[in-house]
Every structure is written in C-alpha cells, then in structure tokens.
Image (cartoon, coloured by chain):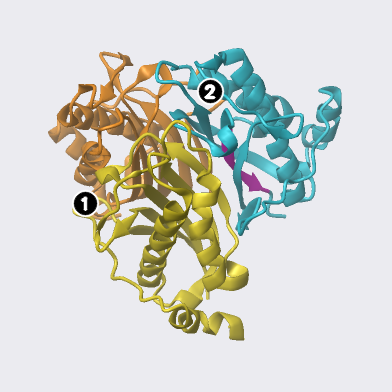
Chain colours: A orange, B cyan, C yellow
Amino acid sequence: MSIHSRSIYDTLKRLNITLPPVAVPAAAYAPFVKNGTLIFVSGHIAKREGRPWAGQLGAGLNTAEGQQAARGIAIDLIGTLHAAAGDLNNISRIVKLMVLVNSAPTFTEQHLVANGASDLLVEVFGDAGPHARSAFGVAQIPFGSCVEIDLIAEMKTD
Amino acid sequence: MSIHSRSIYDTLKRLNITLPPVAVPAAAYAPFVKNGTLIFVSGHIAKREGRPWAGQLGAGLNTAEGQQAARGIAIDLIGTLHAAAGDLNNISRIVKLMVLVNSAPTFTEQHLVANGASDLLVEVFGDAGPHARSAFGVAQIPFGSCVEIDLIAEMKTD
Amino acid sequence: MSIHSRSIYDTLKRLNITLPPVAVPAAAYAPFVKNGTLIFVSGHIAKREGRPWAGQLGAGLNTAEGQQAARGIAIDLIGTLHAAAGDLNNISRIVKLMVLVNSAPTFTEQHLVANGASDLLVEVFGDAGPHARSAFGVAQIPFGSCVEIDLIAEMKTD
C-alpha cells in the first residue's frame, strides 16, 4: 500500500469532511452491489440539512449551487464506498460517474455542475480519483432533487 | 446450488408469470452482451398488449400505472436473462438497474415507479435480487413509452 | 487473431474515416478508465467542425441529422478506444452504449438516432460490434449538444 493511499482519511479530515452513515434505501434495492473488483453504487440524490435539495438548474438554482450539491453527493458516495470497501484505502480507482442534473431547457452547464463531484473525488483519492464520466440534463429526479449521481469504483483484489 | 435457487421457475409459476420470448432488436444492437460474469441487458421499454405503452408520468399516467409498467418491463428483462443465462438459476445477482421514467416537469416519484420492477426482482430472485439502482425522469423514450429499464446481472462462474 | 479483426484499420480507411485525437477533458475526469477487460469510456458529445453541435431533436434538428451526429460521435469514440487499447484489433466486443438524445417533448425516435452510432460500430468491428444499448431523450446536454454517447468495450486479455 502506498503512503499516498494510507492518507485518505487524513485527507478527509484536512478537508473537514465527516462521512455520513450509508442511507439504507426504504425499498427493495441496495446502496451498493459488488461484482469481482467492481462496486456499483446506487444513485445518490442531493441533500441539504439531511433532506432532498429540491430545485432545477437554470430555474432557481445556479451553476455554483449545483456544484455545491454535486460536492455534497460525492461526500455521501464516499461514505457508501467506505461501507462497501471497509477501508477507503482499498479503493484502487473511481471508474465511472453518471451525473444527472435537473435542468431547465436552457441550462447547458451540466459538465460544470459535475465538476463539483469530480474535483472532490480527485482531491480525496489522488491518482485513483480520475474517472470516466457522463453528465447530462434530466427532466426530473426523485423528490425533486437538483442533482443525482451514481458511481462505479474498483477495489483492490488482495 | 441452493434449494432456494432451484425454485425460480416455481416462483414465476406461483406468480402466474409467463416469460416472453426475447425481443430481437430490429437494428444493429443486441438484447444482451456478456462480459466475464456480467450480463449487460439493453434498455427494455414498457409495453401493453405487445405494443409500446406510451404516456408520461404526471401527465395522463399516475404512479400506480407507472409501477405496473415497470413490473411488466421486469418480466421482459427476466425473459431476456433466461435467454442469456440458459437457466435463471445461474443468475447469482441482479447487480444494477437504470430506471428511466418519462416524466412531466412536476412528477417526482420516479423511485416509486422503479419499485414496480425492484420489488418483482426481489420476489423472483430472493437473496440474489437486491440491486444497486438509479431512477430519474427523462424527457422522452423511444416510441413515447412511459418507462424504460436496463440492467446488469451476474452469472455463476461454474 | 482472425483475418477479420486485422482489417479494422482497413475498414476505417475504406469508409474514409480518420480517427481524431482523444479529446482530453479540461476537468478532473478522464476520457476512459480500464478495469479488467473492460474499458469505460466517458460521454462524448456531438461535434461539427470541431465545436459542439448544439440543437434539439424535434425542434430544429430532424432524425437524419441526429443520426449523422450519432455517427460522428461513434467515430470519436473509436478514436478514444484506439488510444485506450493501443490497437483497435484488441477490442473483442463493444459491450454497451448509452445514447442520450436532446429531445423536444414530442420527439420519440431516439432509437433511430442511436442507429447512426450502432450501425457504424457494427460496420467497423464486425462480429465484435453488436452491443447492448439504451437510448432515451434527455432535457439538455453540456454545451447544448444534440447527442451524447458513452460506451463500455471489452479488450482481449492476451
């Protein structure tokens, strides 16, 4: 294990980030499922003060707010990865993000909103952080949330 | 093989579910592709009486109808998994669902619509049923269908 | 290696297709990430003359134009696969496409738009070309682009 990878919890502490407990879905699905070295994480919606952060980008919410929402989701996703992997140092790569932005017809900065999550993941995971990504605007999100993100990550095999 | 897993076709019978034949796409794509232990299944659209079930949630269709549409798609997806795996008892896990709901701007119950599929998959596959999931509202779906779902499943290796 | 697979660059030449260099994202994400035999490719947006091809299907752009946009993205995706795999003959399967179509509320031919990409991939990759696919209409796409596609492909292990 590299010195770098040991420091993930130190990085979180330095960033003043406290990981939340995993939100256990009320329904018949799971926060994550593992297959081989992959962890498939369910879509996490934006929250503020523990409740869905409702709103639409380009109609009430601006890009900076969307980035803040995406950053908050990334923290929740890291919390779920912590639960899935046992130790975040076992995460060898963030593989893929799908970033859904609740978008008014004229809003075209979904990629900038997504950076709120991507930048934090790289800051926390270092070389294991850069990921493939798709970001786009959707018509709605559960509970009217402004952003939803799901993720695939890779775990070390040994 | 566990006693439980042997019973998948019994469960389908008990639920009075008849699996459809796989709908072979008219175009240059496939109903499913396997990689290692994973089966990637194409998006299946909602149908009623063999034709696309057109409509939008929140504008003509209500949540209960959306759930019925999602449940119907799940049956079609199980039919495709049967074709892909040869025997549904070889499916060791439903890994991930992406649930797209044709949504009016005010409709925010995509997660409840998605439960129509998730609940059936858990009922049919038992412990192998709970999956990671993303559900969200889209602007449109091919043929104007009200719901579309794609899926990743895991097969046993031996 | 089959005679067929040797001919991918010949096929591209015959189709008069020049692969573009990989567009390196400006942000903290990557054009692709590999895991095992899989290559996860980031969403690529439609471009024309090197700039985002803005517009909406069903509101200014028609299905034929959408197909042309999707075909152009497929060429860019092949360029990224070339960079990821070193040699396109190492691609053993196009596994999955997600095709996002910037759609007016009344546009329901996302599957036909998607064929612009699917048909080219089958023409170029032959038996390795047919893929699982989901196509649907989204509210917006970064830079207002008319189509966005991401892709999962499989590499040979030896």
Q: What secondary structure is the magenta-colored segment mainly?
A: strand
Tell me which corner region of the image, top left, top right, bottom left or bottom right, holds residue B152.
Answer: top right
Above-or-below relation of C133 to B130: below
**Quadrant for the N terminus of chain A in the image:** bottom left
Chain letter of disc 2? B
Q: B33 and C78: which one is in front?
A: C78
**Residue drawn at x 45%, y 17% as measured from the top left:** B107
**Residue drawn at x 83%, y 34% as measured from the top left:** B9
In the image, is residue B124 part of the stretch drawn in magenta?
Answer: no
Q: How many numbered marks appear?
A: 2
Above-or-below relation of C20 to A45: below
Q: Which residues are magenta?
A: B148-155
Q: Mark 1 — residue? A: A4
Residue C156 shows in the view = no
Residue A29 shown left or right of residue B78 in the figure:
left
Above-or-below relation of A135 to A156: above
Q: Mark 2 — residue? A: B56
> Disc 2 residue type?
Gln
